[in-house]
Amino acid sequence: MASERTDFAEFVEAALPGLLRYGHALTGNPHDAADLVQTVLEKVGSRWSDLQRRTQDPTAYIRRSMANAHISKWRRTRRENLVAELPERKGNPQADPFEHEPLWLALRELPPRQRAVIVLRYYEGLSEQEIAESLGVSQGTVKSQASKAITSLRTKLTAVTEEW
Amino acid sequence: MSNPHEPDELGEDLRRLFADDRLAVPHTSGARDAIVAGAQRRRRRRRAASSSAAMAGVLMLVGGVFAIPAPSDAPPPVASSDGIERVPSTQPPGAAPDPESADAPDRRLPEPRTFADPGPGAGNAEPAPRTGPETYAERGEDGTMFSAGPVLGPDGYGRLRLGMTFEEARDAELLADPDADPPEGCEPYALAEGIESVWHVRISEDLGVAVISASGAHTPEGITTGSSRAEVESAYSRLRAESGGYHAVAGEDSHYRFVFDSHHDVQQLFLRGDRLGQCAWD
């Protein structure tokens, strides 16, 4: 019905910048961020009134869905980016604003699940328990993924610093 | 995280990076309308699928043992790909079929910006063949249809079975990436059909498909993400409390795991083998 559509449209308009920004942190590039946000929002929007009944905070729900979707689709995304750049994007290469940021470059090399844990922790500020619930894994997994990620980031940053 | 050995300096750097203004992704003026239109399309397809499922259910009730052919205009299986939560048989608020004007954009977004418009149909999760074509409908005591759509059964999801090897799943064209590498230890794979029903499947090197993480699929007992704790408790008699949720016996060698959110609704639903192999640390 129109009211639901209008309501969802208003939500999208208000939430889109934040979700794209979050997607950028999660995926490491703006194109994947847009794909991720669009996929998840379309899914959510098709059940908008249902979701609103179920949760007080649709944005939090959407962010968790994005983290899960990101983990789920990384192999496919990575490959498509390598071999099939969409034609309309060719003429519009967007420079990575963080291309000279060692931390960003180090983050980019983390496997998606480790990266998701880092983003949920340091972007969203979630606790270990909350991250475990969001990703549907045990707290032990969150702990080990976070530990691996931090170690990996430190190693890469040290290497970069030494190179310079 | 709460680890006292966490390098605070790195944590601070990460927080600073994630707060950086340059993380903003400019979008086109049409982005919002493309998303709203995409959501409308999905809803229409799902409703078409649900109403045929409901019709089939009614016909089964009326027709008893007589086989009733599916309506000839039934949508292809992919149309039900949103899985199901509760789809009342009566139109819920905001659920009426939309007039053709539904997708007419109402132009209130600011001027075009630099990011490419994702455009309708740009989502890459849609057209793949379905993995789990099983759908059904049931009628609750109050007469509303409470579940229809893809089923996460005790043995697997559609053609994807627990214990199936990575190679079997790949060769059956169930995985999103046909050229994916086999798992090292335990790794998640997206399905070719997209993420409507299942977020991903975790495959272990030693025991094959070990965990299936549902997004829209529901159990044969009608439990799906968004179901309440009370609904889970009434659907399963042998529940065991686990961290953040419940463990319920599914098949002979499998169980469901329900993780609840802060509102006591199912946030995560998994079908897991009782033996998880290298996915055990999950």
Image: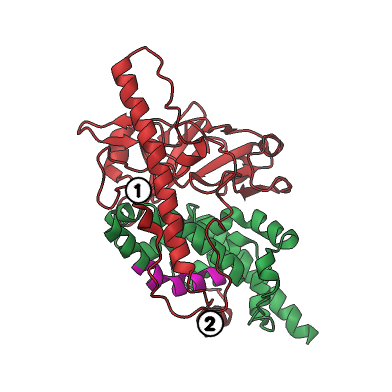
Chain colours: A green, B red
Q: Chain of mark 1?
A: B
Q: Position of residue B161 (x, y in %)?
A: 58, 32
Taking depth in this image into account, of B53 and A57 the one nearest to the observer is: B53
State the residue at coordinates (42%, 55%). B39
| Chain ID, mark 2 | B
User: If you read the primary sequence from the N terminus, does the residue marked by circle 1 or circle 2 appear first?
Assistant: 2
Q: Magenta part of the protein: which range?
A: A10-24
- Which amino acid type corresponds to the residue marked 1 in the rendered image? Gly
Badge 2 marks a residue whose secondary structure is helix
Query: Residue A152: which quarter of the image?
Result: bottom right
Q: Nearer the viewer, mark 1 or mark 2?
A: 1
Give the farthest residue toward the front. Answer: B100
Of all residues, the one furthest to the top in this rendering is: B65
Residue, disc 2: B12
State how far apart marks 1 and 2 are (Cα): 35 Å
Q: Is residue B10 depicted above or below B134 in this figure?
A: below
Residue B226: numbered disc: 1
Considering the whole magenta stretch, tell me its main secondary structure: helix
Residue B243 x %, y %: 41, 50
**Image position, residue B232 (x, y; %):** 32, 39
Residue B130: x, y in percent?
A: 56, 38
Say how many tags the image has.
Answer: 2
As drawn, B33 above or below B212: below
Mark 2 crowdedness (10 Å alpha carbons): few <14, some 14-19, many ≥20: few
In the visual, does B111 lie left or right of B238?
right
The answer to whether B153 appears left or right of B130 in the picture is: left
**Relative to B189, is A156 on the left or the right?**
right
